Amino acid sequence: MGYWSEFFTAFKERFVEEIKIGDIGEEISRAIAPNTVFQIRLGSYSMAITDAVLASWVVMVVIAVLAWLIGHKPQRIPAGKRQLIGESLINLLLKLCQSSNMSYDQAEHVVPYVGTIAVFISLTNLSSMFKIPPPAKNPAFPIALALLTILYVIGMSIHFVGWKGFWHSLTYPKAMLLPFKILDYFIKPVSLSLRLFGNIFGSFILMEFIYLIVPVILPGVVGLWFDLIDGILQGVIFTYLSVTYIGEAIEGAHMAQLAREVART
């Protein structure tokens, strides 16, 4: 009896400690602050490796393993579920690209990047399910992804339609729109980064708040949306917008060329 009495007393004290509401502001500030996991020292220089960097590295390793498992020894007629899953995802991305004014050959060039970005963002967002803060709650993470993506969008647009075609896409239908279209390429990365950061940061804060207020049952239910579905959804939205931006440049170049041909006739 003495053992069970001590056990239930300790259990009760621990349970009360878990559900006790403390300083919410302090708890949330500590939760969103970047945590240094370890430091790399090179002589007099040191580099802090935060939880966001570590989560990104882990996700990159997971992506490499998944790519090897799915793409290992492909067959002309898929015999296993892994190859079927991989081909289904690729076909889905190909159709998305083709619906955004790209030809099949152009879509094949774009799918590797946008597919990798989609998986990378989705998996890093899912890290919150394991109580690891998602990297996207740090503004530097979505800003870096958005800048890289907009440079990729511009590069692929020029690759598909050429310098002249890209220029015509900026001046179509009126040359006076040129400053606004150039400004648009500065606004797009801001929109991409703020959308990703705002959704993940807001979800993370909400989940931390729920863990503080009702830490027993409700977080598991609410987390199915904010940690799982919303995390994947943000990766899908980021990818869809990236593909759409390339499609806009291609469509603008083609429409400008068509308008010139009509004017000549």
Image: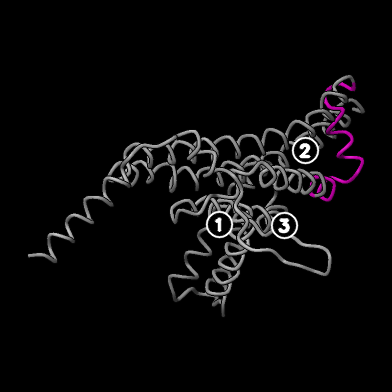
Farthest bottom residue in view: 73
Q: What is the three-letter code of the residue carrying label 3?
A: His
User: Which label is found at residue 109?
Assistant: 3
Q: What is the three-letter code of the residue carrying label 2?
A: Ala
User: Which label is found at residue 249?
Assistant: 2
6 is higher (above) or lower (below) than 149? below
Tell me how far mark 1 sits from mark 3, CA to CA. 13 Å
Tell me how far mark 2 sits from mark 3, CA to CA. 15 Å
Give the camera-side residue of 118 and 207: 207
Q: What is the three-letter code of the residue carrying label 1?
A: Asn
Rendered image quadrant of residue 113: bottom right
Q: Earlier in the sequence, mark 2 or mark 1?
A: 1
Question: 10 Å neighbourhood of mark 3: few (<14), some, or many (≥20)?
Answer: few
- Asked if residue 160 is among those painted magenta in the image, a careful observer would answer yes
Image quadrant for the N terminus? Answer: bottom left
133 is higher (above) or lower (below) than 83? above
At numbered mark 3, what does the secondary structure look like: helix, strand or loop? helix
The structure's colour scheme is: one colour
Query: What is the x, y in percent for residue 4?
Result: 12, 63
